[in-house]
Image: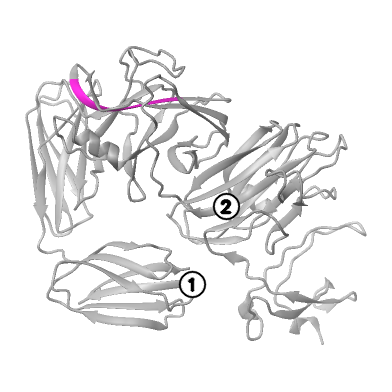
Amino acid sequence: TDMDSWLVAYDILPAGLPNGTTIPIRIDIDSVLLSGGQTAGSTFQIRFGEEDNFPSPSDGLAFDDIKVSDCRLSLPFSDDFFTQKDCWVIEDANNDGYKWEITSTGACDQSEYGLIYEGSTNPSISMNDWLFTPGFYLLGGFTYEVSFSVGDLGFTEKMEVYLSQDNMSSEALSNGTLLFKDEGINDGACYKSAIEFTPSATGTYFIGFHGYSDANTHHKLYIDDFNIKDAPGLSASILEDNTNNTCDQYIVNGVAGNVWHNIYNGNNLIASINPNGQTLGEVYVDMRDGGNVETYNINNQNAKTIPRYFNFDADNTFASDVSVKLYFLQDELDEYNNTAPVTNDGIGDLQINHYDGTSENCDFSDNSDNGTIINNSNISSGVSGMTNIFMQFDVPSFSELLIHQHVSTSTALDYNILVEAKKDFNLITFVAYNEDNIDKYILEKKVNSSNWKKIEEKTSQNKDYYEYEFIDNELDNSTLYRVEIIDLEGRISKTKIVEVRRNDFSFKLNDLFPNPTNGKLMYKILVDENEPLEISIKDVLSKELYSDKITPGANYLINSLDLSELKEGLYFVTFKQGNKRIIKKILKQ
C-alpha cells in the first residue's frame, strides 16, 4: 500500500546530511489517530519510511512492533534506579557514545543502584548529556517538590536541572525553567537537594538533568534517590533552646533559578531560599532558636518577641535581594500569645527586625546595634500544611532576627475609615490628617479565620487633609478591613477594624480540597439557604457521572463528595444555584 494510508506523524530532516549521519528524530503520535486507540501494555505495528519528493515514497521501508507505555505518571513518584525504567529518556546530545546508564555499585548509597555518567577522558570532548524523567501531570498554580541526590568521584563536575513541557534538550533550554545549577560538584561524595516549584499552567511536565562538565574532567557523575511529590506540609522543627549558644548549621548546594530550595532538619522543613533568578551555588545557613518569648526594646518601645537567629552566606556574590521563608510551629505562636500581655496575634500580625545585641553568637557578624536592615522588606506570611506557618521576606544581607509585635513611635494620627457595600464591590474610604511624616498606607482584609491579606497600597500625599479610596472586588458575606500606616522611618501603626456585611452576595466556593484527590473531595461554599443547590461531575467529554440536588438550610456549607469510584483522570465539578454557576477542575489520582 502507499505511505499515505499509514501516515499519522512525520518529521522533516535538515537538508544536506552526509551519508551515514545519525541524528535523533522525535515523532509524537496521538493515540486517537490510531484505529481504536491503544492502551498501556498493548502493541501495534509501526512502519518507518522516507520520502525524497512528496508524494512519491522511496525504498528502504522498515517495520517494527512498538509497545505502548503510559509515560504520564501520577504523584508521588520515586525511583532508586534498581532497574532501567520505562519512559526515562536519555539523550547523548554531543553524540560521543557516552551517556547516562544504570550502575550497581558506586552510586550515592555505594552498595545500591543509581544512575552514573562515566565519560570520555578525551581532552577535546566536553560532557553534554541529558536524562529526562517520565512525564508528570501537574496543575498550574500548585506547588510541588522535586528532590534527588547528586555526587562525583572527586573531579569537578557540572550539572543543571530544568522543568520542561518536553523531554528534548532543545526545548528544555529554550522554554524550560531552571531549578538547580551546580558547577562545583567535587566533594567526592553525594548530597541531596530539595526544590519547590509552581507550574504556571496545567499540563504534562518533565524533569531534565543536564551534565555539562568540562572536557577531560567528567569522570563520574552520579544521580540517585529521585522523588517528586506535592510540596510538603510538614511541621517545622523547634530548634533546641541552646543555652550554650550552639547553632544548627546547614549547607545547601546548587541554589539557582527562580524556585524555592528547601532546608530540612531531618524530615522537618525549617527554611526555604529563593535566589530570584540568581545563581548562588553553595549556600551556608546557621540557625538558632532564641528560646522563650521575651520582651525587647524595638523602635523605642517594649515588644514581645519570638527570637529566631538566622545567618546566611553564599559562594557567589548576589547583586539583588534573596527571598527567605522561616517556618514556625503553631505551638510557637500559641506560646507567644499565652505570654502576658495577651495579644492574640496571627502570623500576619508580626514584624521582622534585624537584631544585634548581647545575644550575638553563631558566628553572626556584628552589623549594627538594634539595626533594621530587613525591616519592612517585602514581608508576608502564610500557612504550609495544617500546623506550619511561615514568614517570608526579601533581604540583601542579614544575621540575627526578631519576630515581634508591630510597634510604632509615631505621633498618634487623626484618621477615619468608612466602608460601603456597593453593587459589585466594597468601597473603603480612609481620611487622613497631618501627613508630614507618613510614607504610605496599606489596606488589609480578613475573611472568616484567614490571615490578614494585603489588598492595595497608597502613597502618602503629604497633605493636612486627604481622602483615600480603596476598592475590593472580591466579595464575601462578611469582611473585616483595616489600614496599616507606615511612616518615613518604617514604623507601623494600624487603624481600628471595621466590618462590612452583604445581604446581596450569597454564592461563593471558598474551598475545594484536596486537589488532586484520591477519592474524598471536601467543599466549603456560601449559598442562599432557601434555594436548592445542584452539584454535578462530568468528565472531559462532558459525560455526566454524578448529580445531586440538596436544600442547604444554612448560608455556609461544609460537605464532601465521594469520587472513589471514578477512574484516574481530569473531571469538572459544577455547583449551580438559580442562574449562578461555579465550575472547578479536579484531578482524580
User: Residue 559 appears at what percent x and percent y?
Assistant: 26, 69
Give how far apart the Cα atoms at labels 1 and 2 are. 22 Å
Q: Is there any visible trace of residue 458 in the rendered image? A: no
Residue 196 shown left or right of residue 508 in the figure: right
Image position of 1 with respect to 399: above or below:
below
Residue 22 shown left or right of residue 230 in the figure: right
- Taking the spot 23% from the left edge, 22% from the top edge, the residue there is 488
Residue farthest along the right direction in this orientation: 19
Q: How many marks?
A: 2
Q: Check disc 1: other Cα within 10 Å, few if <14, some if 14-19, many if 20+.
A: some
Image position of 555 with respect to 56: above or below:
above
Residue 569, label in figure: 1
Residue 9, label in figure: none
Q: Quadrant of residue 215?
A: top right
Label 2 residue SS = strand
- Taking the spot 81% from the left edge, 84% from the top edge, the residue there is 2
Image position of 36 with respect to 120: above or below:
below
Q: Which span of residues is magenta-colored?
A: 302-311
User: Residue 22 appears at what percent x and percent y?
Assistant: 85, 58
Q: Check disc 2: other Cα within 10 Å, few if <14, some if 14-19, many if 20+.
A: some
- Taking the spot 27% from the left edge, 39% from the top edge, the residue there is 347
Residue 425 shown left or right of residue 316 in the figure: left
Residue at label 2?
227
- What is the three-letter code of the residue carrying label 2? Asn
Along the viewing direction, whichever of 375 and 223 lies nearer the viewer = 223
Task: Mark 1 vs mark 2: give the one in front.
Answer: 2
CB atoms of marks 1 and 2 within 8 Å? no
Label 1 residue SS = strand
Q: Is there any visible trace of residue 544 in the rendered image? A: yes
Most frequent secondary structure within the magenta stretch: strand
User: Residue 412 appears at what percent x and percent y?
Assistant: 9, 24
- What is the three-letter code of the residue carrying label 1? Gly
